[in-house]
Image: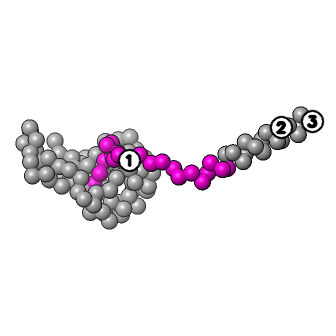
């Protein structure tokens, strides 16, 4: 008798869970403020240090799309959006990178040829 009750309860719970699957997933209405986008473009203004202010271009993409990709695949994906990749840390070791401001350059960390972290876009000192 107890077995029959358990089966009925489990069946009821399963039906309740399955019926919720048709609901649309609610997505946040706002933008991801922590996204690192590329390419960037000048705003026409300069900051307090005299460097040009940059903002994401209209066609900018979220560089998080490059995470967990093999480096060459990430380079191709970034290149299709007009961006380039510089590896700043490879397998835990710092690498020489350009120091010039480049609004189309994405700095990444890699481990065993896989992109593991996006450091930033643009560079400059």
Q: Are marks 1 and 3 in contact (CB under 8 Å)?
A: no
Q: Find residue 12 and report its image quarter.
A: top right
| N-terminal-most mark, 1 or 2 | 2
Q: Secondary structure at mark 2?
A: helix
Q: Secondary structure at mark 3?
A: loop
Q: Quadrant of the C terminus?
A: top left
Give percent across and percent down for residue 75.
35, 60
Q: Quadrant of the N terminus?
A: top right
**Can residue 67 be seen at all in this image of the molecule?**
yes
Local packing at callout 3 (Cα closer than 10 Å; few below 14, some 14-19, many 20+) is: few
Which span of residues is magenta-colored? Answer: 18-38
Q: CA distance from mark 2 to mark 3?
A: 9 Å
Give percent across and percent down for residue 98.
20, 50
Residue closer to the observer: 78 or 10: 10
**Colouring used for the render:** one colour
Q: Residue at x 33, y 60 (%)?
A: 78
Q: Which residue carries the number 2 mark?
A: 6
| Above or below 84: residue 7 | above
Q: Residue at x 35, y 46 (%)?
A: 30
Q: As drawn, is 115 to the left or to the right of 9? A: left
- Residue 95: in magenta span: no
| N-terminal-most mark, 1 or 3 | 3
Give percent across and percent down for residue 49.
9, 38
Q: CA distance from mark 1 to mark 2?
A: 42 Å
Residue 97: mark in rendering: none
| N-terminal-most mark, 2 or 3 | 3
Q: Which residue carries the number 3 mark?
A: 1
Q: Residue at x 8, y 38 (%)?
A: 48
Q: Which residue carries the number 1 mark?
A: 29
Residue closer to the observer: 102 or 52: 52
**Can residue 112 be seen at all in this image of the molecule?**
no
- Magenta part mainly helix, strand or loop? loop
């Amino acid at each position: 008798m107890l077995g029959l009750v358990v089966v009925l309860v489990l069946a009821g719970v399963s039906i309740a869970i399955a019926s919720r699957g048709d609901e649309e997933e609610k997505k946040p209405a706002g933008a991801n403020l922590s996204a690192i986008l590329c390419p960037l473009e000048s705003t026409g203004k300069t900051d307090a240090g005299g460097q040009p202010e940059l903002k994401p271009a209209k066609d900018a993409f979220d560089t998080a799309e490059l995470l967990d990709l093999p480096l060459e695949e990430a380079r191709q994906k970034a290149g299709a959006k007009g961006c380039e990749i510089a590896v700043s840390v490879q397998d835990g070791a710092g690498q020489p990178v350009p120091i010039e401001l480049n609004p189309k350059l994405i700095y990444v960390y890699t481990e065993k040829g896989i992109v593991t972290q996006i450091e930033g876009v643009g560079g400059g000192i």
